Amino acid sequence: MIGTTGLHNLRVDAIVGIYPHERDKAQTLFLDIELDYDFGPAAASDVISDAVDYDGVASAVTELIQTRRFQLLEAMAEATAAMVLERVPVVQAVRLEIQKPAAVPAAASSFVRVTRRRA
């Protein structure tokens, strides 16, 4: 029984951008992360070891984004999706949107969105 778990509006403050002023100070990003996996084992056992630990995913994603100091959201999205698929073997698909609210003053936010599936 395939289900989806995830995080909405995960806040990560990180250095990201191509302009010099973006490389000096952390900006706030918001991530929506959806993870598809088989809920069967977790539903049967009711124990976290059979489920996706979304708190662990949040920590790993935050660490990656803050450590790598990406220039482009596209590179950040690809690296994040790849890392989740590598670290959480039960995940079959990752849908990820990263929003950068301060990028364009006339817009609520800029964003990138990717979907990656396990091969």
Image (cartoon, rainbow, N blue to C red):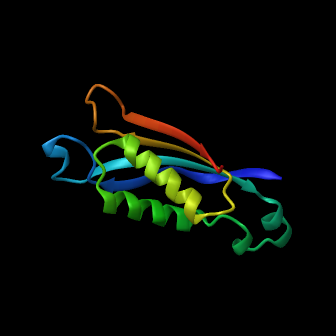
Residue at the far right in the pictured view: 44
Residue 67, quarter of picture? bottom left
Task: Name the residue rendered at 28%, 46% in the picture.
Answer: 71
Seen from the viewer's position, the closer of residues 31 and 36 is 36
Q: Percent x, y for residue 59?
A: 47, 66
Task: Name the residue rendered at 47%, 53% in the picture.
Answer: 80
**In the shown orientation, is residue 8 left or right of residue 16?**
right
Image vertical order of residue 105 relative to residue 11, above or below:
above
**In the shown orientation, is residue 34 left or right of residue 62?**
right
Image vertical order of residue 96 relative to residue 5, above or below:
above
Task: Name the residue rendered at 55%, 58% in the picture.
Answer: 84
**In the shown orientation, is residue 6 left or right of residue 106?**
right
Q: Percent x, y for residue 55?
A: 55, 66
Total labels: the figure holds 0
Q: Percent x, y for residue 100?
A: 35, 41
Q: Percent x, y for residue 29?
A: 37, 48
Residue at the far front in the pictured view: 119
Task: Name the residue rendered at 32%, 58% in the picture.
Answer: 68
